[in-house]
Amino acid sequence: MSIKSLRSTFLPENPILPAIVPVRFSLVLVALCLFTGCGNNPHPSPLREKREDGSPWKTAYRALPDTPRSLDPQVSYDTLGHAVIGMVYESLLQYHPFKTDPYELTPCLAASLPRRLPGPGGGAIYEIKLKAGLRFHDDPCFAATGGKGREITSEDAAYAFKRMADPKVECPILAVLQEYIPGLQKAYEQAKAKGNFDYQQPIPGVDVVDRLTLRLQLVKPYPQIVYWLAMPFTAPVPREAVEYYDGRRHGGETRPQFKFHPVGSGPFRLAEWNRNRLIRLVRHEDYRATVFPSEGWPIAENRRFQPVAGKPLPLIDEVHFTIIREGIPRWLLFRQGYLDSTGVNKDVFNSVVSIGQELTAKYRKRGVQLHKDTEPSTFYMVFNMEDPVLGRNRPLRQALSTAYNEDLSIEIFSNGMDIKAEQILPPGVFGYQRNFVNPCRQFNLARAKELIAAAGYPNGIDPKTGNPLELTIDVTSDSPESRQLTEFQKNQFEQLGLRIKLEENLWSRQQDKMDSGHFQIIAYGWRADYPDPENFFFLFYSPNRPPQGNNHSRYASPEFDRLFEKMRTMENSPERLKIIHQLNALLVEDCPCVLLSHPVYFSLNQPWCPRVSSNPLLSGGLKYAEIDSALRQERQAEWNHSPHWPLGFLLLLIGGAIGYAVFWTRRHHA
Amino acid sequence: MTPWLENLIVIGGLAILIATLWIWAHSDRWQRAWQRFRRDRLGIASLGIIAFYLLVGLMASLRLPAPAHGQACPTILDRLFSGVPKEKSYSAPFADTTYSVNRPEPLKGRHPLGTDVLGKDVLLQTAKACRTALIIAGLTSLIYIPLGTLLGIVAGYFRRWVDDIIQYVYITLASIPNILLLVAILMVLGKGLSQMAIALGITSWVGLCRLIRGESMRQATRPYVEAARALGHGPWVIITRHILPNVMHLVIINLVLGFSGLVLSESILSYIGVGAPVGTPSWGLMIDSARMELSREPVVWWYLVSATGALFFLVLSLNLLGDALRRAFDPKSS
Amino acid sequence: MLFSGPGDIMLNYLLRRILYLFPIVFGVMLITFSLFYVVQSPRAMALQILGPKAPKEAVANWLHNRGYDKPLFFNTAPGKPPLDSQFFHYIKSLAIFDFGVSDATGEPLTEVFKRGAIPSLLITLPSMLLGLFLSVSFSLFLVLVRKSLIDLTGVFICVVLMSFPIMDYVILGQWLIAIKTSYLPAFGFNLEGITTAKYLALPVCIAAVAGLGAETRLYRSIFLEEINQDYVRTAKAKGASPNRILFSHVFKNGLISLITLVVASLPFLIMGSLVLESFFGIPGLGNLTITAIRTSDFAVVRAVVYLGSLLYILGLLLTDICYAAVDPRIRFQ
């Protein structure tokens, strides 16, 4: 990385200003030939060739579509950040890698699942015991131990909760948790008034009982709290690291900010993060929190997983997350064998997936595995319920929803793989009705036209002006795909005779508009934080308004709110199911959004790196992955064969030109 | 804006352009150049191609009355293509079925350049994009040509502090790398065709101004200007009657060559993401989309080829016409 | 101060040139300031962020926290220094290269630029040299066979090459070299000594080839101009071989115009690398800028515009120095 190495290696190859043409020409040719010997492997070499015991050093190569904005576990709230944070930080609990129907939580840093005790005044107390002897990553910030990672205690877990309440940290889930642990809110307001957060003072409700025991005291029941304990927000964080990595200069050296230099307890530690190119993780030698599970996998996988059951993790040594913003290179690198796994986007779909949604012969022969997973998420187009046109006109909203042909969209844009959404809950979440039919989501143009006439706009014409009704969709279209989808959406609504204006916003502007409510229609998607219906219905709960909440449609129905409040603290039961169906019916009737789809992701794994866990909620599942480096090397060589004749042809062409020049000069100037 | 007003603006703009050329074309110098240009086969051919593009652009701009109340007014081009149906998704040029390995479906019509992901005819889109390119390049020229010419002549004729100020302004502008200035202006102004024309106009007058300034400086010392001054003509008379006609050929050459640069800039800006707004047909956006499609298997090549081809032939003929004009006006230099 | 010897004349000349640059830098600051503060006014920005119905105190508070409530250019309020304005604070921070932090990530921009400069230079510098080398060779070749059919075809091919947008070169190059023949990686970058070259080779070649048409045509006309000069005729009359005339006379004399052109073309390299870097995933300044555009990170764009112009102005200065070194007459003007 230093400039020194650069100078020594690069400069001699550069031709300086040419003096005599032919000599330089041949130099360039030689250089060209040298380059071709390099091959097309885009990855930097791994840190080591061999492990200490002589076995091969195993490196996984994955791609990220963008660089995460922050790797602070208490701040990051997007899948991109969690993909990396899940590897670097362990939380108190985690999802079982194999048990997904229903999802099951298992202890991670905690020694066992939290013990629930009755709390005073109808509340609940959760007692969490940590495993003993777990250590943070080695890092210079641990001055007391000379850089060696310190043992994780309940103080660190409590420290994570304190950070959530620190106004400077800006934790996005504080609003959710402070409702149950009021001490967080109090600490937040005190710090805001004083200007800085007092980390010495304990937060009431987050009690450190002893070195390894933490007690959370909730003022009212909230069964979903255990899911938050499996998310990075509650991951223990060493206070030393947060204070050490402050982004300021110390003795001539600028330390990175904590969000760019995570120090955690996960199976991997951050070795390198070149913002726009690569995140390199290396195994955490002292990782003891989890081992490979000894049960739970499908019986068919017995032969594969039996030998590794109970083995220490991680099974591999290094992970490269290469940041590749464009879809093409991502696919290309996978095809060349330089990525271990990738998603299948629609452009390459036909070459990979055959009619029966199976792998095509070419890739089957290569030994590639195809996986189809339904994400616990829902995409929809939000109607602004406070908009004077859309908000007070239920038939208009229903007309728009009925006119939107999602089946066609799925066929064009996802090769028919996504699941059409007819309810806000995605499959796999409690309360999802498999055969539910939403009348407004059955494409029917005639019915839609009736509805829009009933709405007061026959044939889409506004009787007041005599012109087509104009609606605006706010979009951020930064990729060709989103541009095409936007145009499709416009065409769908315009079938009703009205006119759709597309307003293009920069990303931040779009966020502002969503927060302030200055829009008519906006596309939105929600991915489950945890597999509970509460996590989806709260998108329409009226106190959950932006900017604090995610009720972007600003839907406000007293009936809905009342039912929701009743439903959210219930344990799964037939009564709860009944309320869920009522909530669903309310949303269908009021139609505050056009439900689009539950995306199904097709992903591929190379033969040397078969997939282990199919749990979409488990981030950091790479610790279970195994890699056959020898097979990879063999296949890479096989798949990347360069022909030599084009080079010869090029040489011939240049030689011919020189020869002709010489010939011509001789003839004309002699 | 009513469609008729729109049509009037388009036709009016074109008429003004032709009238201006007509007036200038009567001078001796232009007549001689025309004689030379007529024998230049490459020049004539490229002029023909450009005329064709202009025709397509015109057809994509002029609107016909709406077929029914409340509907949008179609352009002539829309009417010409009204018999071309919309397909379901991709189809190859002249294909009978959609472009799908697994489930090909019969098409409703023939498409000489195929269809895109939404099933729209690529030929129609390419033709419509022609209008976008011409409008942006045309509007920009409308901004920068008068600005650059006027400031150049003024600086060259008056010299001294006028020259100093104008020079200072353009050197400062020129010292901000063009593309970055464009991006910055467009980020602040927002997306849109007129915003793009303004941004391009601000950045492209500098070259012309520099050129005209030099030439007017040379002209200003010529005996005929001295004579006019001795006869008591004011500076504005001298500038409009004597200097302007003598630098006009440079303006025309610059206009033609600049036009090709502007068409290219439009496509690059659209590609970077600060150009044409979504839904506008544009070669740059088409090339950007085509990028994704090239990695499809089997490859969707016609989208890229259509956009690139249309862009290429326009820019090529503009470049060739510029060269031909230069040869015609200044036979010595080549 | 008195200047006497020839060395002092050069120094004097240089000083004059450097002093002349200050108003230009000031102008650039003024332009970027007007673009990002006056046209996109902080008040509008605040209303965008806080919503048009935001209470007045909230807007005022937002503006105050960022120093945006100060007057734009001059502070006329009594008891305040007249230069306590947004504009002068802006100038002050730019002058000491304090670009602030990125709007998107909060990283200090100075660090970000330091990191991005090397990959960028690794692309632009070699591509400029390679492009120069190729186009000079081709133009000399065309001059050698001038007025023949080859020459005409060559010029036509140049015009053809000029008429493609750079994206086409990138798409074609990636498809041909990386996908179809797998010579070089289609993507990626890593600073690790000699193997860095394999990531650079393709983008560098593409950049060089994309500029080939325009440059070859330009250099050809420069060399043709030289070849029609009197001294060439004299040399020919004396019996010098055509190769000798071309390389030692025409090439050397054309070199002066060449140097100016090369320096003037430096900013255009940024334009090319803007597209190239994002296509090839090279973490340079171009990639940074594109990302900033897509995430509307005004702070980065503002700083990149300013830095770009500084580099260009530096280029102008270097041209002047080159000119003065080659042609002593200039110093006395």
Image (cartoon, rainbow, N blue to C red):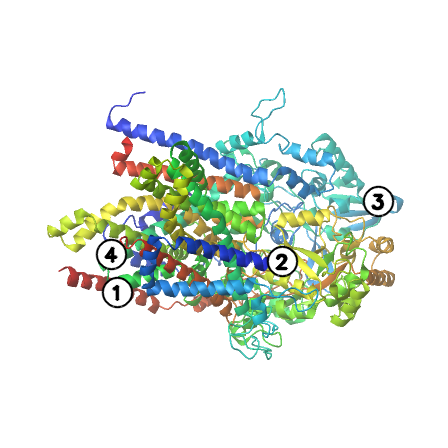
Q: Position of residue A9 (x, y in %)?
A: 35, 48
Q: Position of residue C181 (x, y in %)?
A: 41, 66
**Label of residue C143 in the image:** 4
Chain under disc 2: A
Question: Does A159 appear above or below A421?
Answer: above
- How many other residues sit within 10 Å of disc 4, few (<14), some (14-19) or many (≥20)? many
Q: Position of residue C265 (x, y in %)?
A: 38, 47
Question: Residue at the right extreme?
Answer: A121
Q: Tell if the residue under mark 4 belongs to the same chain as the one under mark 2.
A: no
Between B92 and A119, the one lying in front of the other is: B92
Q: Which residue is mark 2?
A: A621
Between marks 4 and 2, how big is the CA–CA gap?
Answer: 64 Å
Residue type, numbered disc 4: Val
Q: Does any portion of residue C302 appear in the rendered image?
A: yes
Between A146 and B300, the one lying in front of the other is: B300
Residue type, numbered disc 1: Leu
Between B97 and B141, the one lying in front of the other is: B141
Residue A355 lies in what quarter of the image? bottom right
Q: Which residue is mark 3?
A: A219
